[in-house]
Amino acid sequence: MEPVGDFDLEYAAALESTAPVRLGSQYGLFVEGEMVEPAAGRLAPTVNPATGEALAEVSVADAADVDRAVAAARTAWEGGWRDLPGAERAKYLYRVARLLQERAREFAVLETMDGGKPIRESRDLDIPLAAAHFFHYAGWADKLDYAFSGRRAAPLGVAAQVIPWNFPLLMAAWKLAPALACGNTAVLKPAPTTPLTALLLAEVLRDAELPPGVVNIITGDDAAGAALVAHPGVDKVAFTGSTEVGRAIAAEMAGTGKRLTLELGGKAANIVFDDAALDQVTEGIVNGIYFNGGQVCCAGSRLLVQETVADTVVGKLQRRMDTLRVGDPLDKNTDIGAINSQAQLDRITELVASGVAEGAELYTPDCVLPERGFFHAPALFTNVSTAHRIAQEEIFGPVLSVLTFRTAEEAVAKANNTPYGLSAGIWTEKGSRILWMADQMQAGVVWANTFNRFDPASPFGGYRESGYGREGGRAGLLPYVELVA
Amino acid sequence: MSDRLVVNKTYKQFIGGAFERSESGRSYPVAGVGGELLANAVQGSRKDVRDAVAAARSAQGGWAGRTAYNRGQILYRVAEVMESRRDEFSAEVARAGDGCSDEAAAQETTAAIDRWVWYAGWADKFATVLGGANPVAGPYFNLSVPEPVGVVGIVGFGEPPLLPLVSRLAPVIVSGNTAVVLASERCPLVAITLAETLALSDVPSGVVNIITGHRDELVPPLAGHVAVDSLDLTGCEPDMAADASRQAAATITRVVSASAAERQWADESAQSPYLIDAFCETKTVWHPKGR
Amino acid sequence: MTDLLAVETPAGAADAVAGVRITPVDAVGLEQRAAALCTRSIKTSSKAAALDLAIRVMDLTTLEGADTPERVEALCTRAHHPDAADWSVPSVAAVCVYPELVPVAAEALANSPVAVASVAGGFPAGLAPLEARLAEVAWAVAAGADEVDIVLNRSAFLSGRYQKAYDEIAGAKQACGSAHLKVILETGELGSYDQIRRASMLAMVAGADFIKTSTGKIGTSATPAVALCMAEAIRDMAEQTGRSVGLKLAGGIRTAKQAWHYLVIVGETLGPGWLTPERFRLGASSLLNDVLMQRAKLRDGRYQRREDYSVD
């Protein structure tokens, strides 16, 4: 029998202040160090997904704007950036890192307003990691000769970088920092639903006195992104987003000689053995799938749990899910914020419905969702078979599918039974089993007894249809250099 | 008439450790320097490509699972066996395609043998050089290691036929990948002689598979095969490379092509640990550090 | 599964006690979760109730060789009415003293809701002869203790003599009679969270009504991660056996903020059912003043002067 207490623990609606954020009503494009109006004058609203209300109007770049941005990047590259000593490039990047740290709270609040992620995450993870990334790669800029023994690392030229909406500023940092450190210039295109922190970054770049044109930031729709990657003046394309778009870009690049790196989708297995530290496992599973509402390419969306502890783990998980707080992302106590857009919410809802229709059993805690905005309760499916859509397709939402296994071999077979290969989780107290399992995983990042950890020094990127190339660490330099004998 | 009739070699494809004719039953003539018939090579088919990829796939786990020391010894063994048959290789290089002087052919053979030796030594070193511990900001052990990408399709080259092939094949297999090689269309014979050497050198069946025939016919099924993880299109003309890259895009297959420096086949610039890396995936493993 | 009591094996090989499963603990994951729980902010309207709860679950403690009857009597007065000027402040849960002072406390608290707790069983080392320790427990209960705090025999536990450690707790439980038994694990001496979890399970299975972190006599005492580790053990115990064991956190708890953190850790891990003096205690000597100051701040909207609060 559940004991009854006489005290109800209630958390405050501890709202982070939006005071540090000074929103403009309209935003231009950041080209050659200036905010400029788009050629065709088109604007589109960017919406706060927690309220459904527009925050500001943002420029929609067209082919002429892309031309202008690429030309600016080319001029900046040839006009000095490529010949600048590494130590000087480093100092610009260190400045950017410091300015981001100084304005961290402002960036965090804006990130949460524009993208819907909990302030706890933007404050504790996205923004600090973005600054750390600039700091890390700043240090590489004058040490490239030590990175690749026997070879000189030459810059490629102009990098076209198209980034997603799930970690807007962090992905901008992941793209820009190594590109600039290696002596390239860049044209960055943020996602249509989350342009604001990239535009605020433009301010930081200007304050850092980065030479005009070294970084250009153009906002716009998918057509603008397509025009950018297809632009003949671009030497390198880096894309993070869906596998579907990644395929199209790879096909488009064929025969152009442009260098390409892709960071695409995933359907990670989180594998729990019966000897694991089950309470930390529970936290790891929760962090694996409900972090950023599951809108994470490396989310641990398939839980593979050994049959002997399946009921225990699911019980612990359900109990833990009951304590998850879904709601206003600006509330410091919120665990799961808003889904990024109506379109994404629709996709999640559709896939959850398919799971129910295909016979899996759905558990969601009894939580009240806000009336406005785009929200989805954390969901857990049991009785899932590997053939179900929810076990195969990337959902990109707070939806976990539970499958069971009996032996390590079976766990490996099920974990690798996907065209994706971005990440995997292994939970066991047995050291030799961890190392054997890590060897077997067809995945670029293997988290053992932890999940969803990121660091600028640690390479990140996928096997197979999760893309190619790495971001982070020394491996993250390779996509932005040519090795010359 | 000479006293003794020479016994000519039949050049077959090399699939899963066996020398086989094409399932299609076809062959095509291969001409020497003066246009004379050197041999009828097998004209491989789409199905031969399929079988070769299947053989490569099933051999890959075992090959990658060998110790690096063992793979190094096997690559070194290839050099040993080539050395013992260097005259045969030199003669074959000299009369292939447009041919070359005996001296140049001998140099090419020597360079090819030395390239095997160079890569043999990398087997138990490239992971040390390309991977390592990453000092992350937290209580975690974090290690990156290069792992073989899996099955690599290598599109063969024009002339000269031996050194480019070895220069591209050795860095692919040294890490534990298996390969499906489309031999040079015009000069395929030395690739088959190399296959015979591999078969004698403890290279396990299926690790290297060599198909001969027409590229127009063979590149598309190779490039489009879902089980091919990476493609080396160094031997392709630009249009064919573009088509193959488009095919490869559907399954996010990694496409690699030699740089200009790497095409200076006889130079040291043609060999590099980063070429091994080009056919590897970086895997990064995290683990907490706690009592 | 190796059973702690079935085979006398070195620590590390065991993962059950009397058939109750013991789960391993990952230190980094545990500490991260504990730190995350400490970032929760409590609703202002809840804060007053939270402060009152912190008082209601408090074991006001004095365990000094220099404790005199007068000092204990003064402490008992405060325990009953922590703020002489504001009788709306609730009484604490218990006053915790050495056995010799139990009769003093029992008399002073006779007409109050405050319980008398006594340390016993060779506190704080627990290495007096077993007969003497059990006799001390019985003596304290006979002298009027409602609750007895004993220590785990770390000498036995750390050397793998689990059966001995278990038997001693079971013996103390018997000697307690109807009094509540709290078993102090002295977590700072156990070396790892795995050992804390194992000791928690062993103590609960042996009959502890409460498990408690520390004696307060060594440098290391309660931490959020240790509290979480023990709360998770209690949750497993409840799930596996249906028995609800209480948690007492002691040592180094000096501020209202720390108390809130522990309320959150216990509330989120074990549920609101544990946020009651029946199942949750904070053992402290100097915490009360800080809670009273925060309470006054909440009431008057002014920060307080520490020197104005009782020095007892």
Image (tube, rainbow, N blue to C red):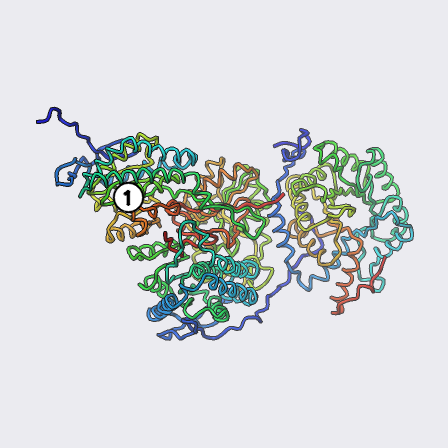
- Image quadrant holding the N terminus of chain C, namely top right
Instruction: Identify the residue at the far top of this view.
Output: B3
Q: Is residue B107 visible?
A: yes
Residue C292 horizontal/vertical position (percent): 78, 61
Left or right of residue A453: residue B279: left
Q: Is residue A275 above or below residue A20?
A: above
At 54% from the left and 40% from the top, the residue drawn is A310
Residue C35 horizontal/vertical position (percent): 63, 53
Residue A158 horizontal/vertical position (percent): 37, 63
Relative depth, front residue between A216 and B35: B35
Relative depth, front residue between C309 and B109: B109
10 Å crowding of disc 1: few (<14), some (14-19), many (20+): many
Instruction: Identify the residue at the far left of this view.
Output: B1
Instruction: Identify the residue at the far front of this view.
Output: B103
Q: Is residue A354 above or below residue A89?
A: above
Figure disc tally? 1
Q: Is residue A360 visible?
A: no
Residue assigned mark 1: B164
* Amino acid type shown at disc 1: Pro
Left or right of residue C21: residue A349: left
At 77% from the left and 43% from the top, the residue drawn is C182
At 31% from the left and 37% from the top, the residue drawn is B113
**Is disc 1 placed on a helix, strand or loop?**
helix
The quadrant holding residue C258 is bottom right
Residue A480 horizontal/vertical position (percent): 40, 57
The quadrant holding residue A326 is bottom right
- Image quadrant holding the C terminus of chain C, namely bottom right
Q: Chain of mark 1?
A: B
